[in-house]
Image (cartoon, helix red, strand yellow):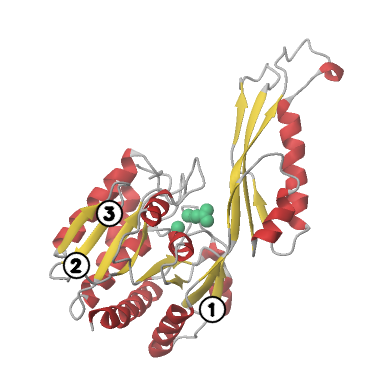
């Protein structure tokens, strides 16, 4: 299966362990170059926008007509998996190639810096949405791995996404006073890392108290960062998610900083329906799921582009943002067929 070989080629960029193509890095650029080559091989016209997002467009389209887009991102978290983002681009490319036999108003897009290792993420899709011009895309359909255990538990290969949770991301800075680790009595210290550690526990408890909310501190930067110096400053990353902004804000009540907040979004009901029909046509269970992970699809949906998402079962207990991320070839093949069907349907109504 050429798609799986392509995922391996992308995974090899940057060396291991895991995928290492951080947003804004030379490795993300290399992935975009590689995919641009595959787009050209498929006979697509390759374009890039000012934000560096990559588009593969069908030749012979009518530029005055809106396009149906599919795609995802090529950047990864540090030591990430093979499938997060990359599947939506290489699977989207294959689906566009196949659907392009019948319909022309189709494009596959690779957005820049979705993970946002040093910011709120979805940098490329936010830039696209800030500059949407007529004709705006008629629809966007993102194929993605589930990144959770629910499809594996339900013994189902695919799901239609109904919406994406609300999020808040940012950083809290704790200030202390540096000093000698051996000579400063415990009573006289102002240790920024002790304050940060207490905050991490308070945040965990605040999230646990709100239905369905999750909160994560994934990065600490300790200054001056020596084993014999009392920490003078600690920067703590904060990532909070819940079904809606109201619940996110309940957790944020314990966070002493302004974070960047993104409201929950719903997928377009007409696209949910188109994707449901594709799953029914494949004879697989027609499941619906809300996404706990963020996606470029959320940015396009919030900008008013009719948006849908298709999830593929994650194996290994649904682990993601890890080299252990896994999805099966048969599930992936079914997902690409469902995506092809949905793109053909959607583009047919544009081309009419
Ligand atoms: C993207 O992977 C996210 O953080 O949800
Ligand atoms: Mn991710
Ligand atoms: Mn992703």
Question: Which badge, 1 or 3, is on the more N-terminal residue?
Answer: 3
Under tag 3, what secondary structure? strand
Numbered mark located on residue 81 in the image: none
Question: Which badge, 2 or 3, is on the more N-terminal residue?
Answer: 3
Under tag 1, what secondary structure? strand
Numbered mark located on residue 54 in the image: 3
Residue found at x 21% / y 54%: 47
Quarter of the figure with residue 125: bottom left
In what quadrant of the picture does the N terminus appear? bottom left
Mark 2, other Cα within 10 Å: few <14 / some 14–19 / many ≥20? few
Question: Which badge, 1 or 2, is on the more N-terminal residue?
Answer: 2
Give the label, 1 or 2, closer to the camera: 2
Q: CA distance from mark 1 to mark 3?
A: 30 Å
Mark 3, other Cα within 10 Å: few <14 / some 14–19 / many ≥20? many
Q: CA distance from mark 1 to mark 2?
A: 34 Å
Residue found at x 54% / y 78%: 288
In the figure, is residue 105 to the left or right of 205?
A: left
Q: Observer-nearest residue: 278 or 247?
A: 247
Task: Give the vertical position of 9 relative to 180 (above or below).
Answer: below
In x, y percent, where is residue 61? Answer: 17, 71
Mark 1, other Cα within 10 Å: few <14 / some 14–19 / many ≥20? some
Numbered mark located on residue 63 in the image: 2
Q: Label 1: which residue?
A: 288
Q: CA distance from mark 2 to mark 3?
A: 17 Å
Judged from the image, the quadrant occupied by ligand 3 is bottom left
Q: Is mark 1 within 8 Å of ligand 1?
A: no
């Amino acid at each position: 299966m050429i798609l799986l070989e392509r995922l391996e080629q992308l995974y090899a960029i940057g060396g291991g362990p895991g995928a290492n193509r951080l947003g804004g890095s030379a490795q993300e650029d290399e992935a975009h170059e590689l995919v641009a080559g595959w787009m050209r091989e498929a006979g697509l016209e390759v374009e890039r926008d000012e934000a560096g997002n990559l588009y593969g467009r069908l030749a012979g389209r009518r530029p005055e007509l809106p396009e149906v887009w599919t795609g995802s991102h090529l950047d990864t978290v540090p030591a990430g998996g093979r499938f997060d983002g990359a599947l939506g681009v290489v699977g989207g490319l294959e689906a566009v190639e196949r659907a392009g036999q019948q319909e022309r108003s189709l494009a596959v897009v690779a957005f820049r810096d979705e993970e946002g290792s040093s910011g709120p993420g979805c940098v490329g899709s936010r830039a696209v949405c800030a500059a949407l011009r007529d004709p705006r895309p008629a629809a966007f359909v993102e194929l993605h791995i589930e990144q959770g255990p629910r499809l594996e538990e339900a013994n189902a290969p695919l799901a239609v996404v109904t919406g994406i949770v609300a999020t808040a991301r940012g950083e809290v800075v704790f200030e202390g006073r540096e000093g000698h680790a051996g000579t400063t009595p415990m009573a006289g210290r102002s240790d920024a890392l002790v304050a940060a550690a207490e905050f991490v526990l308070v945040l965990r408890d605040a999230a646990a108290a709100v239905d369905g909310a999750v909160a994560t501190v994934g990065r600490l930067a300790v200054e001056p960062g020596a084993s014999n110096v009392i920490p003078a400053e600690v920067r703590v990353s904060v990532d909070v998610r819940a079904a809606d902004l109201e619940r996110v804000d309940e957790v944020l009540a314990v966070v002493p900083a302004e974070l960047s907040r993104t409201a929950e979004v719903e997928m377009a009901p007409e696209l949910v329906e188109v994707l449901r029909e594709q799953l029914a046509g494949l004879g697989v269970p027609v499941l619906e799921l809300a996404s706990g992970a963020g996606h470029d699809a959320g940015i396009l949906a919030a900008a008013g582009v009719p948006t849908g998402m298709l999830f593929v079962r994650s194996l290994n207990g649904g682990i993601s943002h890890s080299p252990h991320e896994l999805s099966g070839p048969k599930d992936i093949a079914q997902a690409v067929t469902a995506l092809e069907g949905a793109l053909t349907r959607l583009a047919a109504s544009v081309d009419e």
